[in-house]
Amino acid sequence: MRFRFSQLALALPISLFALVNVAAQDRVIVQPRRVVLIRSGKLARDFPERRRAIVRYPIVQGLSDAKVLRRINNTLAIKNVFDTSLAEYRQDAWLEDFNYKVNYNRNYLLDITFTQSGMGAYPDTSTKHFLINLKSGMVIKAADAFNLSGLETLAGMVNQKLKDETKELIKEVERDKEQNAEQKSSLKERLDQLSFTQENLNEFSVSDRGVTFLYDAGFPHVIQALQPDGRYFFSYAVLRPHIKSSGPLGVFK
C-alpha cells in the first residue's frame, strides 16, 4: 500500500506538469529583441538628427513543435514585415523606430502588429498586421476562419460600416473652409468611391470580444487626415453564423 502511494505521489507532479505543458501550447512566449542602429559617414553628416534608430522585434518561443515555431519566426522576421532588412534600415536614414505590439496571445491565436516610423520628405508611419494559427504556424485568412458561403455577406456588413464612416467624413469636407470647391469635390468623390470587398476580408484582428476588420484606404500623406480609420468591430455574437466551426475562431462560436 505504501509502495502504491509512493508511486502515485511521484506520478502526480509529472501528470500535473504534462497538463500545464499541454495547456500552455495554446499560447507562446514572445521575447523582445532590441537593436540600436548607429549610422555613420556621409549619411550621419547629412542627417545628424537621424543618426540613431531603434529596432525592436519579437522572437517567439514556447511551442513543442519546432517546425511550427520556425515557421512563425520566419513569418515575423524583420525582412518579411515591411520587405526591408536590418542592413537596409541601417543604410537608409529614413527609419527612426521599428516596434511591435502583441494584441492577443491565447486560444492558439497570435495577433501582432508591427509599426515603423521615420522621416523622409515628411513624417510617415506604416503598420503591418499578422494573425497566426499557433497549431500550424500559418497566417490566418478569411477562408480559414469563416464559412465560404457567408464571405459575401460578411464583406457587405463591413462595407456598410465603411460607408457610414465615409458619409461623416464627407460632411467634414463640406464644412472645411480651407478647401476650395474643386478640392472638396475631389475629396468627396474619393471618399464616395471607397468600398470593402471580399478581398479585404483577409485583414482582421481578434480579441476575446470579437473581430476587428482592418482596411487601408491608401490616401497620400497630404490628405491622410481624411482617410477612414479603417477599423470595423463585430462581436462574436454577431459573427457566429459566419464563423467556421472547425476553423481557428471556432472556440468563440
Image (cartoon, rainbow, N blue to C red):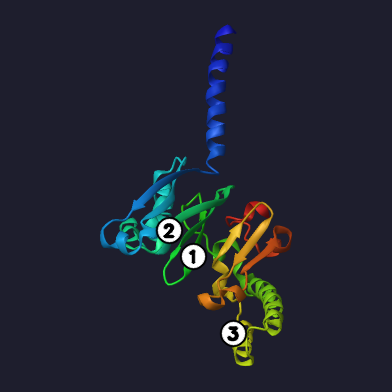
226 and 65: which one is in front? 226
Separation (CA) of disc 2 from disc 3: 31 Å
214 and 52: which one is in front? 52
Mark in front: 1 vs 2: 2
Q: Earlier in the sequence, mark 1 or mark 2?
A: 2
Element carrying mark 1: strand
Residue 24 marker: none
Number of disc labels: 3
Q: Amino acid under label 3?
A: Arg
Separation (CA) of disc 1 from disc 3: 21 Å
In the image, residue 95 lies at what x, y percent? 40, 61
Q: Amino acid under label 1?
A: Ser
Question: Which residue is under mark 2?
Answer: 96
Q: Quadrant of residue 118?
A: bottom left
Q: Earlier in the sequence, mark 2 or mark 3?
A: 2
In the figure, is residue 100 to the left or right of 211? Answer: left
In the image, residue 50 lies at what x, y percent? 38, 59
In what quadrant of the picture does the C terminus appear?
Answer: bottom right
User: Looking at this rendering, what residue extends furthest in the left direction?
Assistant: 41
Mark in front: 2 vs 3: 2
158 and 103: which one is in front? 103
In what quadrant of the picture does the N terminus appear?
Answer: top right
Element carrying mark 3: helix
Residue 190 marker: 3
Q: Amino acid under label 2?
A: Glu
Identify the residue at horizontal 54%, vertical 28% (top origin). 17
Packing grade of label 2 (10 A; few <14, some 14-19, many >=20) is: some
Question: Which residue is under mark 1?
Answer: 126
